[in-house]
């Protein structure tokens, strides 16, 4: 019966052939209305974004913390339980991609642009003690007595960055991806979020309830990806300014969104096995080269020791940090601006990244999936942040005028986060040609990560709208590939970074409810499967 319902849910001919007509119309209509309303009155849209963010931060901060912790605890339980032996597919199925390609695609789709944007600016923000933003730069360091800008505070700064980019966030991706892969490949249900609710509501997933669940995933994906693309183009524009004197303003950013969205759409049309896989592996190669430059030109031994110590400290304090809820108003302001934004961003990305991870993970066991997705990309991300951020912190610690006088931290205090990367590169070498080459490499890497994030998102959105078809119609990949770029451009026009962050946090709210229901459905079905 389920297969028959699945077939009836997608159009067999006409304009919407291959898609669920109800979902396709609703999704396009919502995005179109959002774009038109935001463009009609940019100032009113900006004010609405600010009110939305204030309400979420003041009312639901605890809820986001609980939701993310629930994901991490569930992952740890499943990895250590007998359920870990269950295969995501038939018992005799084998993985579709070799492990190296699988891990490269996990890393590129799951993090990408965000690491380049925040890997230097965020550690320096937490290392700073000026409170220039109007709230403590790092209340966790202040509570521990590390208030001076020295190596002790530097360690606390890196620990908090690792917390925001580590196990808690990736656990969200693991749960969504695991649910989709398990129900899609083992239970033969559509590769969509609605399938995880089948143990709870049965074949009603093919009705309005299922449509709403998948539409929420589409909206979360659109705004989550748009947030990342908006951050990426602002940093790319800064890079072009450094390299060629191009004005980094909003016009340049919109042009960049248009150009790279077109490239991402072409990649999405080519599919996972060609464009997306090749670009993901290309990203890893470029990343290794850039990381090598930072290690060679910077104090490599000091940085690696600093990273190792910070990782150990992070792992020791990860659970207490994850459960901490600030009660002081100024500490709460920091937690809302940083931690709650990050949890919302991870959750809003979860349908898109989870779907993509599931799509490339057929044939792996539950334990292999959890270890691969939770541990390996986290380790790679922490190494990246440690090397980039560690070099920037060392430059500030070792500055001739005293700690905090190297000039990079001033960029962060002024809110010029995207320039911190290029400021660090400029101070690593006195050779102009090498500085220019590294800046060009960083900008190129931004563009390729931009493309892999956007093309993966496009493929996932059209997969959801086609009821889990891993090869959705190409014409709709083109529509959504360009549509995501339009949403990112509108958010930049509305209110820049604030609008981008608010969109991600707001989109995460309904998705988080679905996520908790998916966990319940997965645990119920796994218990039956093992019996």
Image: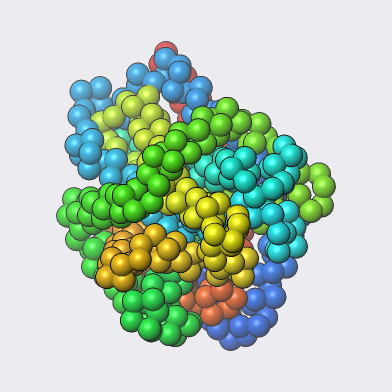
Q: Residue furthest left?
A: 274
Q: Residue furthest right?
A: 328
- Relative to 92, 364 lies left or right: right
At x 58%, y 86%, the residue is 40
Nearer to us in this view, 257 or 524: 257
Asked which quadrant contains residue 173, the reply is top left
At x 38%, y 29%, the residue is 371
Nearer to us in this view, 515 or 138: 138
In this figure, what is the number of numbered marks? Answer: 0
- Relative to 343, 446 lies left or right: left
Using the image, determine if residue 374 lies above or below residue 432. Answer: above
Find residue 527 and report its horizontal and vertical position in percent: 47, 19
- Relative to 137, 30 lies left or right: left
Find residue 135 and report its horizontal and vertical position in percent: 75, 57
Nearer to us in this view, 265 or 198: 265
At x 68%, y 72%, the residue is 48
Using the image, determine if residue 470 lies above or below residue 436. Answer: above
Can residue 446 be seen from the camera position used here? no
Can residue 394 be seen from the camera position used here? yes
At x 65%, y 36%, the residue is 321
Using the image, determine if residue 215 lies above or below residue 141. Answer: below
Find residue 492 and report its horizontal and vertical position in percent: 52, 75
Nearer to us in this view, 465 or 142: 142
Placement of the N terminus among the 4 image quadrants: top left
- How is the model colour-coded? rainbow
Placement of the C terminus among the 4 image quadrants: top left
Find residue 123 and report its horizontal and vertical position in percent: 55, 51
């Amino acid at each position: 019966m389920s297969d028959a319902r699945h077939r009836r849910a997608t159009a067999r001919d006409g304009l919407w052939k291959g898609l669920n007509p109800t979902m396709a119309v609703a999704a396009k209509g919502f995005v179109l209305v959002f774009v038109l309303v935001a463009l009609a009155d940019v100032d009113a849209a900006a004010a609405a974004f600010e009110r939305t963010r204030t309400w979420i931060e003041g009312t639901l901060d605890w809820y986001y913390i609980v939701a993310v912790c629930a994901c991490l605890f569930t992952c740890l339980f499943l990895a250590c339980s007998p359920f870990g032996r269950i295969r995501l597919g038939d018992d005799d199925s084998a993985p579709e991609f070799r492990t190296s390609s699988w891990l490269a695609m996990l890393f590129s789709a799951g993090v990408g642009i965000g690491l380049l944007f925040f890997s230097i600016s965020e550690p320096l923000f937490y290392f700073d003690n000026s409170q220039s933003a109007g709230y403590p730069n790092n209340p966790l360091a202040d509570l521990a007595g590390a208030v001076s800008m020295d190596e002790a505070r530097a360690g606390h700064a890196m620990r908090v960055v690792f917390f925001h980019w580590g196990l808690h966030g990736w656990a969200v991706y693991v749960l969504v991806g695991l649910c989709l892969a398990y129900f899609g490949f083992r239970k033969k249900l559509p590769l969509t979020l609605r399938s995880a609710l089948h143990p709870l509501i049965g074949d009603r997933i093919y009705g309005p309830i299922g449509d709403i669940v998948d539409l929420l995933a589409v909206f979360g994906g659109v705004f989550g990806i748009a947030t990342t693309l908006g951050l990426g183009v602002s940093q790319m524009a800064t890079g072009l300014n450094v390299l060629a004197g191009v004005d980094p303003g909003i016009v340049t950013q919109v042009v960049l969104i248009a150009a790279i969205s077109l490239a991402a759409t072409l990649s999405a049309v080519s599919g996972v096995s060609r464009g997306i896989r090749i670009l993901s592996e290309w990203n890893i190669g470029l990343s290794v080269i850039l990381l090598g430059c930072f290690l060679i030109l910077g104090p490599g031994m000091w940085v690696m020791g600093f990273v190792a110590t910070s990782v150990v400290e992070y792992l020791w304090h990860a659970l207490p940090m994850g459960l901490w809820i600030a009660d002081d108003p100024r500490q709460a302001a920091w937690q809302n601006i940083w931690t709650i934004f990050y949890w919302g961003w991870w959750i809003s990305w979860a349908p898109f990244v989870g779907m993509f991870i599931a799509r490339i993970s057929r044939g792996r066991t539950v334990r292999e999936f959890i270890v691969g997705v939770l541990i390996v990309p986290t380790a790679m991300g922490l190494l990246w942040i440690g090397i980039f951020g560690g070099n920037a912190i060392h430059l500030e610690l070792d500055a001739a005028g005293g700690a905090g006088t190297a000039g990079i931290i001033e960029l962060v205090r002024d809110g010029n986060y995207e320039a911190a990367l290029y400021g660090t590169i400029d101070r690593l070498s006195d050779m102009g040609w090498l500085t220019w080459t590294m800046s060009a490499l960083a900008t190129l890497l931004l563009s390729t990560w931009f493309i892999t994030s956007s093309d993966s998102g496009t493929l996932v959105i059209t997969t959801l709208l086609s009821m889990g078809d891993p090869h959705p119609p190409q014409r709709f990949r083109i529509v959504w590939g360009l549509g995501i770029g339009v949403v990112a451009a509108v958010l930049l026009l509305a209110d820049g970074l604030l609008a981008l962050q608010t969109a991600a946090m707001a989109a995460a709210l309904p998705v988080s409810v679905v996520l908790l229901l998916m966990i319940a459905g997965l645990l119920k079905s796994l218990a039956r499967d093992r019996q």
